[in-house]
Amino acid sequence: MARGPPPPGGPHARARLRVRVPSSRGLPHGGRAVRERTVRRLLRGGHGVSRAARAGAEQPRLPAPPPWLRWLPAGYLAVVLAIEPVTPVDWPVSFLLIALPLVAAYAYGPWAVAVVTVFAIVFEGVLAGTPCCAGRFVGYLWDRHYVANYVCTSLVGVLGAILAVHRTRRERTLATVRTVAETAQRVLLRPVPRRLGQVAVETLYLSAAAEARIGGDLYEVVPTAFGVRLLVGDVRGKGLVAVETAATMLGAFREAAHDEPDLTGVARRMERSMSRHAAQLPGGEAAERFVTAVFAEIPDHEPVIRIVNCGHPPPLIIKEGGVAELHATDPSPPINLGVLTGDGYHQDVEPFGPGDQLLLYTDGVTETRGPGGAFYPLAERVGPWVGLAPRELLDRLHEDLLAYSGGNLDDDIAALAAYRLPGDSRS
């Protein structure tokens, strides 16, 4: 069967986007123009949504100022009104209203500041020339001192409006940065499944950079044919390089967890990946870019837990009898320092039956300082919480850290709780 000539544009032209639009026949005058505009909107990806609507949907929501800041202008005005009756006539306190627009600029936008400025000028005139209220004659209304007061209030109002515009832009920029950071955090530290077979898992992440909401701590949980494998790590350093290193670490773990039959193989695989990543860093940062980490494996059909600790704080095992720290019998080097030290990676095996709970965490937990400078005693604090479910345990830990530090957390914090559900581990 004969085939027609190929379409213009080469053999791939058939894969182009085809938009089916009703014919313009029978349309009233101008129908062809409407049809062409429809095609252009579809090809641009607008799908009939106006540009203004798309821009509005992409605008981040600005944080609302605290209530005390919103009520501060009204409180300031109330103080002026309270002082006015008790001061002599020769001491006009209406001059204090000059600062009212500036006070409003910290909580409101430029238009609201302009309204407050007009109100302040009018109210200054009321206080200047009302015999019944201020005890002054109407002639004081245009006294040179009060005229200077009106001019100064106007100038302060202009400066307050400029300040309000600048503050709004800064807040919008900060809101955009936080939105981007939250998106990056969801990509890197994606939510883990709350239950994987006979294991219930919960996580906690707190960034010391409240404006960014993302740091160098990391965690991951991967169900594999060898059991549930867990990772909690802490990247040395801060900033974008730490985030990039954390992304490399997580990507390598998600692949190696499925391929390597034992945790020491996973650690060696991570060492090779991190070494390649560090080799691409400029200057002497390669040797300084390392990650402390704990790898854990909870087999489906064995009441044990396997752990490889690479220079990380020791995990906690929480049982009915109490809390115990799992110190490595043969410590392993941090990731990306194995080549320098020449040491291998070693695995420890501990009993982990139904009802037992594992708590992995970063050093931001144990290095939290109290009012007297003492470090947070994690094992001692967790002792009374034996029997709590993983989510309740992490929530209690979060509340206790805030209470212990007085709300001043100076380092990133990541924690992961894994609880083996009651039942036969061989079922």
Image (cartoon, helix red, strand yellow):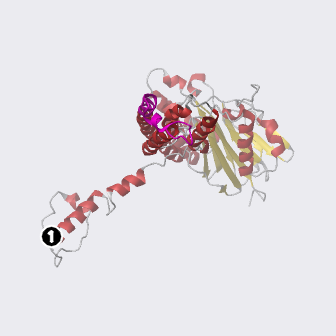
Extent of the magenta region: 129-152
Crowd around label 1: few <14 · some 14–19 · many ≥20 (10 Å): few
Residue furthest toward the bottom? Answer: 26
Measured as percent of width and height from the top left, residue 75 is found at 60, 41
Residue pictured at 52% horizontal, 31% vertical? 95
Depth check: give the residue in front, 169 or 365: 169
Secondary structure beneath disc 1?
loop
Asked whether, in this view, residue 34 is left or right of residue 131, the answer is: left
Image quadrant of residue 152? top left
Depth check: give the residue in front, 237 or 375: 375
Measured as percent of width and height from the top left, residue 27 is found at 18, 76
Would you place residue 191 above or below residue 50 in this image? above
Can the viewer see residue 273? no
Q: Quadrant of the C terminus?
A: bottom right
Q: Quadrant of the N terminus?
A: bottom left
Measured as percent of width and height from the top left, residue 57 is found at 42, 54
User: The disc labelled 1 sits on which kind of residue?
Assistant: Arg
Asked whether, in this view, residue 422 is left or right of residue 83, the answer is: right
Image quadrant of residue 315? top right
Would you place residue 336 above or below residue 175 in this image? above
Residue pictured at 57% horizontal, 43% vertical? 74
Depth check: give the residue in front, 416 or 342: 416
Would you place residue 387 above or below residue 173 in this image? below
Residue designated by label 1: 3
Q: How many marks?
A: 1
Magenta-colored stretch includes residue 124: no
Can the viewer see residue 283? yes
Residue furthest toward the right? Answer: 321
Depth check: give the residue in front, 365 or 128: 128
Asked whether, in this view, residue 292 is left or right of residue 42, the answer is: right
